[in-house]
Image (cartoon, rainbow, N blue to C red):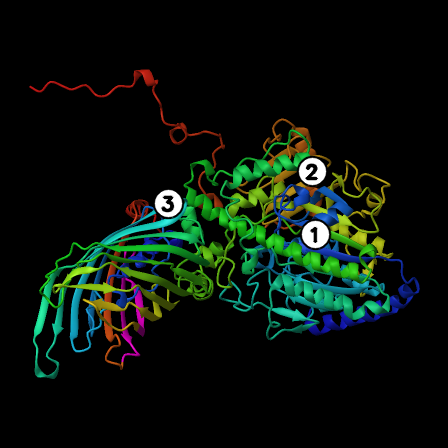
Amino acid sequence: MKHALSPSRLASGFAFVLCLVPMLASAQVPPRFYWKTLSGANAFPLIYLSVSGNSNPFDPAHVVSDIEFEAEVFMVGYAKVFTLFDRSATVAVLETMGRVTADTRLGGLGAIEQTTGFGDPLVELAIGLLGPPPIKNMPDLLRYEPGFSLDLLVDLVLPIGEYDREAAVNLGQNRWYGRVGFPIVWQLSRWVPGKRTTLELLPSLWLYGDNDDFQGATLETDPMFQVEGHLTRDFGESFWASLDSTLMTGGKSTIQGHVGESLSNLGVGFTMGYQLSENLQMTAGYMASIDDSAPTDLRMDVFKVSLVYGWHKIIEGMGRLGSAE
Amino acid sequence: MNSESSIHRHTIVVLIAIALATTAMAQEDARPNIVILLADDMGFADLGSFGGEIATPNIDALATAGVRFTNFYTHASCSPTRSLLLSGVDTHLNGLGNMSEWTAPNQRGVPGYEGYLNDRVATLPQLLRGAGYHTYMTGKWHMGKAPDKIPAARGFERDFSLLDGGGNYWDMTNVVAASPRLVFTEDGSYLKSLPPDYYATRTYTDKMIEYIESNREDGKPFFAYVAHQAPHDPYHLPREWRKRHVGEYDKAWDAVRQERLARQIELGIVPEGTELSERMWFVPDPTVLAPASRATLGMKMELYAGMVENMDFHIGRLIEYLKQINEYDNTIFIVFGDNGAEGTDLFAMIAGSPGTLNYLWAAVNWSQTHPNSWGDPGSFVGYGPMWAQVSMTPFSQYKGWLAEGGIRNALIVSGPVSRRSAGSINHSFLHVADIMPTLLEVAAVDYPEALNGQALPPLIGKSWVPLLSGETESPRTDEDWMAWELFGNRALRQGSWKLRWQSRPFGKGDWELFDLAKDVAERHDLARERPEKLAEMTGLWEEYAATNNVILPSRSVYEDLQNTLPTRFPQVPGYPPLIYKGQFVPPPEMMAEPKEGSHP
């Protein structure tokens, strides 16, 4: 019973919130993103990202070969699990803050430019299409196994973050963008803490509006197709790890008639997760692009650390009564 | 008695048997094959043909072709029942006066209380083998582990046997730290390891088919004893069998018991008007339980149902094989459970005390407690008293006790020996000890007066052959009686009367008297109302005890229950009202918003 009804199950279920970083497409969605949890559950994610590369991490489709970008970013948000059309659904908002630095001193010229503040908020809605029914109550939670699940994911980034038309880098992007994706979780082993193995895929299509004030010009970006993959495995009841990969293609940018290159990049990395307490889970990971030798290739690496605090009023109450075990 | 001399004696028996076999072969051989299908801890009401919702089509097909018996008695626990089955002699004489796990200090060293099937009895396979039968056993033995006590030494020509009382279904891991490995034998040799792809229920079936196949060309009949470990806890089950009843038992035990009783009445298993036994006082009313609690407990019953269905599937494989080799029509099938369903938390009893070796052993080997791991090798799930009561619908209590729920089980007999209407139901008083005289008569074997120069105790059962042939409706008259004693608890049945003494709190620590014709649920103790009947039956009990060397134990597995279980109160539906009263809803026309007050 301890494992079945423990709040830790909720917290681990909230691992999904870790991945609310589609605004940083190159950072990819973390593993165990689309595991379901009890309807009515809530989560506060806190995510730290350290990103470097040749593209603004908020706009990976826009590669600038002679600039080095560095970003130190915190993302905070809130997520809620609910039932929609008798399917499991999640709605979340995530706000980005931090600093992005662009170093244009390659070749001994140029300068360092930095921007700080708040980026564009993201709103996400995910709903299960195929797979297990929604976890409406504790009996459902007891019986949950993903088996094979396929969800519909819609992300929308609102262009209300800080944006300076004269700056080389910005946290806000001054355009609408988002994506439609189909997260897949395929259970490969017994669904028992300490034994779980999954293969997770997320094919998605990013769609970008125009930034009509990109240093006085118009920035247009073609749709970008992305497939993320994770092979995850428990290495204890509280510890898991994942091999991660992401493939991006398309996303060709055009600035005032000047056409850039389409992306075709592969990144690989790993993630480790640990359940710190009944309500709190931590993950840490690293990912880097591997086919990035050409000047026009996206080159980026990302360190990620996240903390997610999850709770549900029933579980919390049971804990207060001492019966959560 | 040392093992060597005993083996020598058994060798002589075998030689005699071979000689007798020659004679028997001359009859070749209208005698039927015999298959005993014994389920471990399966309840009276679990089979579909006895009112259960569990899908048991193969066993039910035997019921449809044969006869169901509703007044069949076993003993209250595993090895005593098995000893009665294979010796036909009272437990206090055959060595199982107490289980070896619970031999009381005052029973140690006393003949009849050895804890194994002693060598002062002849066994059914010994006698059948001597009369020309092939004798095969697969499954749980639980009547001795020494070389002279294993199945090969007690009459089985071929065997694949678990000598322990239970344990892992997937490997040799035992539950008890002191004896960490289960012990198996195959054809008289102790196994170093188990066959590849071992799963108890499947392997027992495979082996039995292999044994029958190996000798089927010689024309001799066979006696096949398939003593399934299933559905004894731990409920170990292949994954594909675990999800066949998802959510079906969330309605909980009271509802399922009522549904089973309704079907039993409809089928004619019990008469119209039969009352359910009381829900045991320490079993919660499921209507006041949270959904998660009901679901969790329901999942245990889902797993148990899967165990029974898996066993039925493998029984079906054996039946199908016999049909394929054209032996089905000449085979007697006897199907029953060895005692009442298990309501005691065996795992807690063994490994429930932190700091003990057994707890440490369980932490390493038996600690898969997540519901999704239930059924896996490292899990130990039993379904508890609430579902044991369901399995024993409509009876009272469960395994280990001498209430009807502990000793009464479903019995199916089919095959050429039966001339009764196919699918019929018989309510006569039968006992597991009847099987030995029945099968000896079927096989045309006389029960010997002596074995190895030693007089044999009498068989206590009565042959069912006249009953099965339709000559009579019962092998017993209303004056015939049978008695039980185990763990100090006592019972005696004569006609429809049942005398019972059980320790507190399951009993009163005194004699109780029930008229099962009117009160099969043992709700109404008539001891005070019928003192003359009570005296008559206690007299019979004293006669039984004296004749069979009954020594009441000075210690018992249940000796502390009075202190560990909640105080026993009568179970009255709806009490206390505090937890049952629903929300009061005032008349709508009298509802109002609060008035605005005037502020000083």
CB under 8 Å between discs 2 and 3: no
Residue annotated with mark 1: B58
Secondary structure under the numbered disc 1 in the rendered image: helix
Residue A277 belongs to magenta span: yes
Residue annotated with mark 2: B269
- Observer able to see residue B541: yes
- Residue closer to the observer: B271 or B561: B271
Mark 1, residues whose alpha carbon is within 10 Å: few (<14), some, or many (≥20)?
Answer: many
Residues at marks 2 and 3 on the same chain: no
Residue type (three-letter) at the residue carrying disc 2: Ile
Secondary structure under the numbered disc 3 in the rendered image: strand
Question: Residue B132, image x and y in percent?
Answer: 85, 65
- Residue closer to the observer: A110 or B268: A110
Quadrant, the N terminus of chain B: bottom right
Task: Kindly identify which chain the residue marked by label 2 belongs to.
Answer: B
Residue A84 got which mark?
3
Secondary structure mostly taken by the magenta-highlighted segment of the chain = strand
Kindly indicate the quadrant of the structure image that contains residue B448. Answer: bottom right
* Marked residue nearer the N-terminal end (2 or 1): 1
Per the rendered image, the range of residues in magenta is A264-292
- Residue closer to the observer: A35 or B535: A35
CB under 8 Å between discs 2 and 1: no
Question: Residue B426, image x and y in percent?
Answer: 76, 40
Kindly indicate the quadrant of the structure image that contains residue A242. Answer: bottom left
Q: Is residue A254 left or right of residue A127?
A: left
Give the CA separation, mark 2 to mark 3.
Answer: 48 Å
Q: Give the residue drawn at x 32%, y 54%.
A: A154
Q: Report how many numbered discs are placed on residues in the image.
A: 3
Residue type (three-letter) at the residue carrying disc 3: Leu
Residue type (three-letter) at the residue carrying disc 1: Asn
Mark 3, residues whose alpha carbon is within 10 Å: few (<14), some, or many (≥20)?
Answer: some
